[in-house]
Structures are given as C-alpha cells and as structure tokens.
Image (cartoon, rainbow, N blue to C red):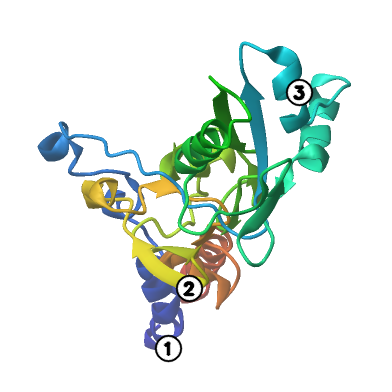
Amino acid sequence: MKQFIFNILPIFILVFNSCASKEDIYYLQDAESNSVGNIVYNSTFIQPNDILKITVESSDIRASMPYNRTSSGSMQQGIEMMKLDGYLVDLKNTINFPVLGPISTLNFTTTVLAEYIRTKLVDGGHLSDPSVVVRLINAKFTILGEVNVPGTYNFTEQNISILQAIGYAGDLTINGNRDDILVTREVNGIRQVTRINLTSSDFMRSAYYFVKPNDVIIINPNKPKVASSGFIGNVGTVATVVSLVLTMTILLTR
C-alpha cells in the first residue's frame, strides 16, 4: 500500500501545481482603484517601409490634381490599390512627392508631415489654400503564442490599445500567461522590448498601452501549461491517470 502511495504521490503534486487561480486569469484585477484616468493618445512616427496616402485638396480642383494619386475598384480592391498608389517611405526616411520632390519624413508624424507639405505648397506659390491629409495605410501588428487566432493583423485606426489587439486575435487562451506579455517595438531603427502585466491596470498608463505599427506581441504559456506539457500533455489526461491508479489501488488492496 505504501508503495502505491509513493508511486502516485508525484502525480498528485503535478495536478496541484497545474491548477491556476483566478489571480492568474482575471484581467485588470485592480481596475476599481484605477477606474478614472486621462487617456494620452500618442502619435506614431513615420518609419521606413510605411506606405502613406497623401490627399491634397484646394478650391481649385484642377490645380490640386497633380498632387493626388487615385485608386479605383471595389472597397477591398481600393485598399490594395491605395497601397500601390501610396508613397513608400524608403530606408532613408524619404518620399518623392510631386512637384516638391524628395521630402524627409524623419521624426515626422502623419500630422506633422501634412502640415509640412501644406506649408511648402503655400510658400512655393503652388496652391493658395490647400488642405493636406496624410494617413498610414499599411499599419499592422503581429501577435503570437497562446491566443486563439495568432497572426499578423492590419488596422486603419490612429490608435488601438493592446487589449483591442488581443481582441483581434480572439483573446488569450486559458493557458496564456497574462502577467508576462512580451512586446517588441522598433523606434527609429532601435528595437525596444518590454513586458506587460494584464492582471494589473498599471500598463494602461504606459507608452505600451497603445499598439504601434509593426509591434510584435508574444503570449507565452502559463506555468500550468508548461507543467502539463512536460509530463503527460494536459490536466485532463493527468486526472484520468490518477483516477485509474486510485481504482487499481483500491481493488488490489482489497
């Protein structure tokens, strides 16, 4: 009898260690204490390989036509055509704009670039009252690991939060490590890596609350998932084995 107990003891220990508490699973567990706070929207700096849609309008439609590239087709085809017709930022952070020639986008946001182009058009005597809009049309992020639908996702919003990004991927699986989310980000050619704890609301005040284009979000498995994968495969299988062993023990000891 003692030998049987000795044999099944490691299995009981494994099952115990494989149990996750609500503290490991619930998001924003301190939300009540941080329920009110100002949202700081961050502008994204233009990066190499970004594709920009630049629209120039003025009271003289014919005068503003040379500055616009037009797309045609259905809505989905139009998005792809806009990418082909857009301005690709080269590795030197430069675009080649009609009439004005090469324009540096280094340390520019889309808003700053729009104002810069508008000023150049006015100061150069090209247009008297232009309106310029610049939009990033190939913004994307990648999310990998313990989510229901990992992959690379495009977005057109100016700002999306990391919680919205996780929503794109169908939420974390029950095995996702919610208190150690890895985010890699490239800013002006420098790679930054940080970790986020989704069980606390502190990250909502950080620079990583909003996703930036080309962010990579990695969801590692939690401890129960790692523990179960290293032994039999999952907790359900372990429970079945424990039940079998206990049944055999009772039968043999009788």
**Direction from residue 253 to residue 2 in the image, left or right:** left
Residue 16 visible to the viewer: yes
The residue where tag 1 is placed is 3
In the picture, the disc for residue 65 is: 3
In the depicted structure, whether residue 146 falls above or below residue 230? above
- Residue at mark 2 to residue at mark 3: CA–CA distance: 38 Å
Q: Residue at x 55, y 78 (%)?
A: 230
What is the CA distance from the residue labelled 1 to the residue labelled 3? Answer: 87 Å
Question: Can residue 200 be seen in the rendering of this structure?
Answer: no
Q: Position of residue 138 (x, y in %)?
A: 67, 44
Viewed as shown, does residue 225 lie left or right of 137? left
Mark drawn on residue 190: 2
Residue extending farthest front: 125
Q: Nearer the viewer, residue 166 or 191?
A: 191
Residue type at tag 3: Met
Q: Nearer the viewer, residue 55 or 237?
A: 55
Along the viewing direction, whichever of 51 and 13 lies nearer the viewer: 51
Viewer-nearest of discs 1 and 3:
3
Residue at the location (47% across, 56% down)? Answer: 176
Disc 3 element: helix
Q: Nearer the viewer, mark 2 or mark 1?
A: 2
The quarter of the picture where the N terminus appears is: bottom left
Work out how far the residue at label 2 is from the one at label 1, CA to CA, in angstroms.
Answer: 59 Å
Q: Looking at the rendered structure, which numbered label has been put on residue 214?
A: none
